[in-house]
Amino acid sequence: MINRPRIFTLDDAPQAVLNQHGFAGQDILSVNQFTPDSLAYIFDVAEEMRAMVERKGGDDLLRGRVLTCLFYEPSTRTSSSFIAAMERLGGSVIPITQGVQFSSVSKGETLHDTIRTLEQYSDVIVLRHPETGSARIAAAAAEIPVINAGDGTGEHPTQALLDLFTIKEELGRLDGIHVAMVGDLRYGRTVHSLTQLLLNYDVRFSFVSPEILRLPLDYMNQVRDAGKEVRETYNVADIIESADVLYVTRVQKERFTDLSQYEQVKDFYRITPELMERAKATAVIMHPLPRVSEIDVRVDSDPRAAYFRQVKNGMYIRMALLAAVLGKA
Ligand code: ASP
């Protein structure tokens, strides 16, 4: 019998580096698990998934497999794209995406017990949770793969993968580009994850935010330690002419303890058609969504607006990841 520790902490949590042939049975918890080779591999599989969906809508690669989607925080895109990904591959889903307050969690069940229970029914668990580090704790408790779908202000690795995939699809390259991250760089976990992934490539960074929403120092230090050229500014106009990617994010209202601070910064920046007149013809505008007011809806008809294409890429990336961790890619 396996002698398991009864209480799992971050120190118990596994975080294997993934290589092209090593995805089966692994957890996906952090972007730090990926190497340029494993990224290229997942992108190739995602391309195959796109071609397959465009040709015939779906197939039965994961028939008989069950995914549990366990979401302790609201989500529209991430939960529905995992569900669509699993169903297009012929698998089934236990969706706990609206109802954590109706489940045993509201009776006081621990994350550990919830995970140990749900893994009895399923082959893979996708978890979103408000606490940073929770996905790693869940992974330590579970025998089956756990995929982190966002843990507090920590990471959102599958979003970062789809963001990187989108940059590659839109620009045709990942090297020699200028990426401007705009908005809530302090609380935006998608910014934290994508910044780390981009360190694998020859990228110049601009971080555009009001003072109180600057990128946390440990991420900034990682960028500097990687020898990347980096600029910080609060003015989008400073970078609009040279950016290849404008990665725009909403101000994360739910993370503020003092709502008067949120009120001060919520309308700090706005991408408009007038501003986009000064951007490169080849620039790409991205957003992890949901959008509040930071991109004017008139920008949606600009061919450079990639945020809805980005959503679709999320499904292909998640199909690739599910197939890979279930040993079918
Ligand atoms: N959907 C993304 C996330 O879950 C971005 C956001 O909520 O602003 O982090």
Image (tube, rainbow, N blue to C red):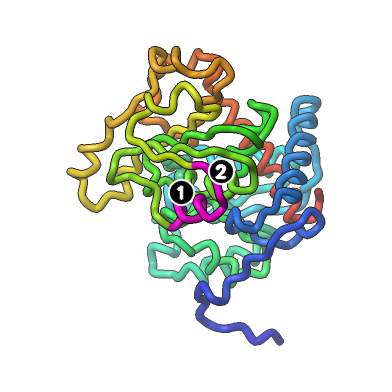
Q: Say whether residue 308 is visible.
A: yes
Q: Main secondary structure of the magenta part?
A: helix
Stretch in magenta: 218-229
Task: Give whichever of 188, 2 is nearer the camera.
Answer: 188
Mark linked to residue 159? 2
Q: Dot 2: what SS? A: helix
> Compared with residue 20, is residue 57 higher up or lower down, i.e. above or below?
above
- Residue 302 pos. (x, y %): 51, 14
Do the CB atoms of the residues marked 2 and 1 lie less than 8 Å apart? yes
Q: Any atom of ligand 1 within 8 Å of the CB at mark 2?
A: yes
Tell me if 299 is positioned left or right of 136 in this view. left
Q: Which mark is first along the chain, 1 or 2?
A: 2
Task: Give whichever of 67, 151 is nearer the camera.
Answer: 151
Mark linked to residue 35? none
- Residue 271 pos. (x, y %): 39, 23
Three-letter code, disc 1:
Arg
* Residue under the image location 75 percent in, 51 percent down: 324
Three-letter code, disc 2:
Gln
Q: Quadrant of ligand 1?
A: top left
* Residue under the image location 25 percent in, 37 percent down: 265
Task: Give whichever of 129, 276 is nearer the camera.
Answer: 276
